[in-house]
Each structure stands twice: as C-alpha cells, then as structure tokens.
Amino acid sequence: MSNQLNIRNVPTDLRHWIRRETQRSQQKQNEFLITTLRQAAQLSYTPPLPFDLPLGRATNEERLPFSFIDLFAGIGGFRIALEENGGKCLFTSEWDRYSQRTYSRWFGEMPRGDITEIHPSEIPDHDILAAGFPCQPFSIAGVSKKNSLGRLHGFKCTTQGTLFFNIATIAEIKRPPVLLLENVKNLKSHDQGRTWKTICDTLEELQYAVFSEVIDAAGWVPQHRERVYIVCFDKYLFGDAPAFEFPAPPENSPKFEDILEQSPDPKYTLTDHLWGYLQEYAERHREKGNGFGFGLADLRGVSRTLSARYYKDGSEILIPQARKNPRRLTPRECQRLMGFPDDPSRFPIVVSDTQAYRQFGNAVVPKVASAVVRSILPVLRGQWERQNKGCLLKRPIPELEQAAV
C-alpha cells in the first residue's frame, strides 16, 4: 500500500474548515491533516466550534451559551444585556478614559482603547459582535470616478476613515455569525440618507441578512428614547431569510416617579438665576412659534430623552418640586432612568456628576438590548437544532474558497 493519499472531490465546507484551522494553528496543511487524523484515531479529538454550545439541551430553552465582543462599549449597556442572557464577553474596546474607569469597576476588566489602533487579528473569535458606534458621514470622493472607470471599490472605499469601517473590517475578517448594532434614530436620515444606505450596502456586501427597527425605550424605562437597532445574520450560516423579529414593548410601562430618590441633595435644585434664564429662553422661543425650552417631567408618565449634554443645565428633564424651583436628576436617578441595575455596591458611580451624566446620556438601554438579544437567541437555537445539536461551523464563502485540497 502506498504511503501517499490522494483525496478527490473534498466538499467545499471541509476545504473551508481545513483552510481556517490551518491558519489558526499556523501549521502547513499536510501537518495539520496528519495531526487531526492521529487525534481522531485516538478518539480524543473534538472539532472546534464557533459557538460554545452544550452537547445536550440547555436547561432553560431561552438561554444558550455564546460569546461576544463589546465595541464602543461605553459603560457596558450591551454587556449587561448579553451577559444576563448567557453570553461570555471575550473582548472590549472603549476609548474614553472616564467610561473605562466605570467599565473597569463594574466588570472587573479594563477595556482596550481606540479601536482604530487594534488589528482584527488581536480580537478573539466570537459569536456576536455588539457595537453602539458613532454616527459619521461617509465620503464619496473618488467613488464616482471609480464607477466611471469600471473599477470595483466596495465598502473599503466608501467607509474608509470612519469608525464603521472598523466594524465592517472586523466582520469581514472574523465572520461573527451575528452583528448587534445600535445608533441614534437620525442615522436613517443622516446626510440625506446616504449614511444609512452606505451602512446597509456594506453589511449586505459582506453577506449579512440585515434587520433594522427604531425602538422607543419607553416600554422598558420611563423615558422616550428612540434608537435604531440593527441585527445582522451571516447568510452563509443562517441563509438569506432567518426567522428573526424585533421584540414588542411590554404592556405595562414604568412611571417616571418610580426612579426618583426620596431625599435628593439640595444641590440639584436649580438656582434662581438658572431657573429664570430657562424660563426666559423658553418664552422667547414660544413667541417665535417653536417648542424649544425646558421640559418639566410628568411624574406619572415618561420623560424626554436623556442626552449626554444633561450636565450643562438639565433643562430637557426637570423635576417639579412643591414651593421650590425645579431640580435636575441626580446621577443615580439617571442610572435608573436608563435601566441600569440599581445596586450601588455592584454598580457604583465612580466618576464626577458631569462624567456620569455624559456616560448615562450616551449609553445603550440594557433592558431594550436584552429584549433584542432574547429575540436573537431562538434563531441561534434553531440553527443548533437543525444541526442535530452538533457543530455550527459556518458554510464557506464561495469566492474565498477556490483552492482545492
């Protein structure tokens, strides 16, 4: 019998797997195959899985172990949501040093810094990429010229230089099965819709099925806060039309008065000077026929949107007080208004009031994110069930798999 093996007609998915694992182990292809066959012969080999899945049915049908990375992490709104649904965080990036301080205290690890200085090879494989990325315009300089010359450009041209480009590049290289993104509502209309079109075109170019919806957090917290959520599924794993639907809000919305402290520090009450200025400012705009001005919260209803500029004067959400000037929210009340856990020992405020207002005003609402994650998990479980509770290795990307074994 010859020592040479000549295997023909190797299925494309196996070629894809061999290529990926050869690169991961930094072995030559022949060395990797011999090692794998030897381990299989010894009945000691378990193929690597992109999902950290149990071999049997999970005790709770709603929970499924998975891994994720947390980009543009802020103070961890996405992380809270993903961890409470069974996720394990493998990597975090956040550039703001004050947010890093809060994140480190809350989760016991210091986030990596600027994502633009981190190469995708430094990021571990993961199941869900979560990111609350900034809204930025995309430059189309040079794109029209390339079109006229018949040259391909794709997302590397249209998104180069933006922070979304870093997300797209990580998605291209690491191929996470799911992307979970959040942004301001105006992302869809930003730059006359060009920003939104470029984002969707990029995600579709990367072969992700894209779902998006503007969700008002008022169903989960006593605050009108409309944000667009984007959920994407790898078409090579889930097909072109995965059975995903965004969650409906709870029927019983919380009331604003539920988040108020009983005895707030008097320093949060507006001075006569500031209260007088805000009233005069509002009156000037009323005379011009617009609605700019302060907002007194309806204690039995929901408030306006908490913004990152709340530290300046607190005018968008003021709390009426009997026989006193209105007051602004305390940082602890902002924490509750955003739906973060109200546990000072586990989630203490470790920065100044100014930084706390900025952090909560910029944050993802964990309760909304958690509801979206719970809608994602049945899609993951469905794929797992279809694979007979076994390996969830992704199918290959055809244009990248030309070489045969």
Image (tube, grey):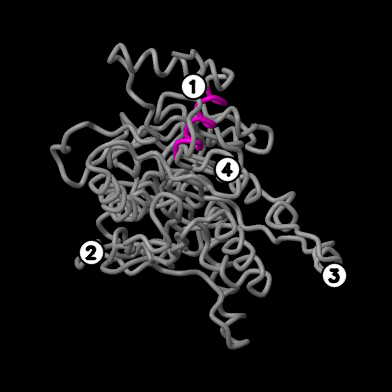
Of tags 4 and 3, which is closer to the observer?
4
Mark before the other along the chain sequence, 3 or 2: 3
In this rendering, position of residue 198 left or right of residue 238: right
Q: Which residue is mark 2?
A: 250
Q: Amino acid at mark 3?
A: Ser
Query: Which contiguous range is marked in magenta?
Result: 13-24
Of tags 1 and 3, which is closer to the observer?
1
Q: Which residue is mark 1?
A: 5
The local crowd at label 4, few if under 14, some if 14 to 19, many if 20 or more residues have their Cα within 10 Å, is: few
Q: Secondary structure at mark 1?
A: loop
Q: Amino acid at mark 2?
A: Pro
CA gap between label 4 and label 1 equals: 22 Å
Q: Quadrant of residue 348?
A: top left
Q: Secondary structure at mark 4?
A: loop
Q: Nearer the viewer, residue 15 or 7?
A: 7
Of tags 3 and 2, which is closer to the observer?
3
Which corner quadrant holds the C terminus?
A: top right
Residue 130 in the image: above or below residue 210: above
Which residue sits at x=36%, y=52%?
A: 369
* Residue 141 position within the rendered picture, expressed as x and y whole percent measured from the top left: 83, 62
Residue 178 in view here: yes
Is 14 inside the magenta-drawn segment?
Answer: yes
Which residue sits at x=15%, y=41%?
A: 60
Q: Amino acid at mark 1?
A: Leu
Q: Which residue is mark 4?
A: 401
Mark before the other along the chain sequence, 1 or 2: 1
Is 218 inside the magenta-drawn segment?
Answer: no
CA gap between label 1 and label 3 equals: 50 Å
